[in-house]
Image (cartoon, helix red, strand yellow):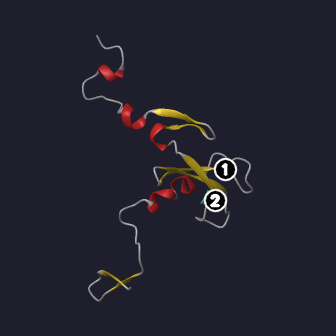
Amino acid sequence: MIQSVKDIPRFGIKEDQYAYGVDAIHGYMSQGKIPDHWIKTTCGYCSVGCGMDVGVKDDRIVGGSGRPGSPGQSRPFCPKGLCEHVPMTSPLRAKEPLAEDSRGHLIPLS
Ligand code: SF4
């Protein structure tokens, strides 16, 4: 008998990846994104400059959240601000100056 969606074959909810947890500062969030500590900064995506907290876990950025009470901060946090940390951890992120050669390939300048 099916008592939960988890009992339906191939209808897993991947709770190991998407389980919720409770962060002491920001409340409910994905368990995997609860950081070891938060770093106060500002979002640099647009000219509003909302205050934000960047979550760090095992020396890696795992998430961002609006800092409650900071100037310019709207609640909930804007989607661009929420995703600002994603390019920082992308394996495609440029880590040195690049220039495009005549064939359209990016080559390091240094
Ligand atoms: S959180 Fe949104 S509104 Fe605030 S600075 Fe970032 S992009 Fe601009």
**Quick one: quadrant of the C terminus?**
bottom left
In the rendered image, which quarter is residue 49 located in?
Answer: bottom right
Q: Which residue is mark 1?
A: 67
Can you give x and y, in whole percent of width and height, for residue 70 in the image? Answer: 73, 53
Q: Is residue 12 above or below residue 86?
A: above
Q: Residues within 10 Å of mark 1 (few under 14, many from 20)?
A: many
Name the residue tied to disc 2.
41
- The part of the image, by quadrant, that contains residue 39 is bottom right
- Distance from disc 2 to disc 1, alpha carbons, whole Å, reads 9 Å
Which residue is located at x 51 percent, y 41 percent? 34
Q: Tell me if 69 is positioned left or right of 57 in this view.
A: right
What number is the disc on residue 6? none
In front of the other: 72 or 110: 110
Q: Are marks 2 and 1 in contact (CB under 8 Å)?
A: no
Q: Residue at x 63, y 54 (%)?
A: 52
Q: Position of residue 35 (x, y in %)?
A: 52, 45
